[in-house]
Image (tube, helix red, strand yellow):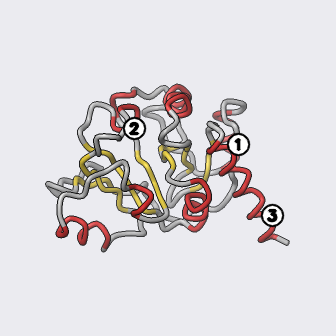
Amino acid sequence: MRKKKSSWHLKKASEIIRSGGVIAYPTEAVYGLGSDPWDRKAVLKILSIKKRSINKGLIVIASDLRQLESLICIPDQFIKTKILKTWPGPSTWVLPASAQCPYWLRGEHSGLAVRISAHPLCKALCDLAGPIVSTSANLASQPSLKTAWKVQMQFNDQLDYLLRGSLSGNAEPSSIIDAISDKIIR
């Protein structure tokens, strides 16, 4: 019975993403806000909800590398091997953005932050919906929210759906590393 309920909620969340909606969902360490990365209007809604500048750029998560291929360029096999050793997992890598990568995802940067999530709900959601925007559920420069209740209280009716679930238990959000320079951004 519980599995069917989970499956129904995942299907509903993926349908909302594919139809241009914005959802909140659990990730490894915090709740995230997500949408279809190709849907400009949905991504701009996330930025508006968070009061976040479009120039900062966003993270896109996926269930496998294939889902990210149209957004990024992996310069060589060495870098590909390096990042794949950490995925799925809590490492977010900044890779050169492809020519097709929209400005609303990368902001003023030439790269895009991407992650193959190890969180079972994120993976299942990406399996159904494709890659999704993943930014912490909070107002810009405010603490990230770690419970569905706090997300509901903060964002009330601004979201199209709240996918409830457990965080993976990581103490901090994913690390963000520049894949070319190995510089730790976060």
**The residue under label 2 is which amino acid type?**
Leu
Query: Gap between marks 1 and 3, in whole Å?
Result: 15 Å
Q: Are dots 1 and 3 in contact, CB under 8 Å?
A: no
Residue 165 position within the rendered picture, expressed as x and y whole percent measured from the top left:
67, 59
| Residue 151 image-quadrant placement | top right
Residue 42 position within the rendered picture, expressed as x and y whole percent measured from the top left:
56, 33
Question: Dot 1 corresponds to which residue?
Answer: 161
Question: Dot 2 corresponds to which residue?
Answer: 105
Question: Dot 3 corresponds to which residue?
Answer: 5
Q: Residue at x 23, y 69 (%)?
A: 82
Query: Gap between marks 2 and 3, in whole Å?
Result: 32 Å
Where 119 falls versus 18 (above or below)? below
Observer-nearest residue: 95 or 172? 95
Instruction: Describe the element under mark 2 as helix, strand or loop.
Output: helix
74 relative to 107 in the view: left or right: left
Sequence order check, earlier mark of 1 and 2 = 2
Sequence order check, earlier mark of 1 and 3 = 3
Query: Gap between marks 1 and 2, in whole Å?
Result: 21 Å
Instruction: Describe the element under mark 3 as helix, strand or loop.
Output: helix
**The residue under label 3 is which amino acid type?**
Lys
Where 56 falls versus 65 (above or below)? above
The residue positioned farthest toward the right in the image shown: 1
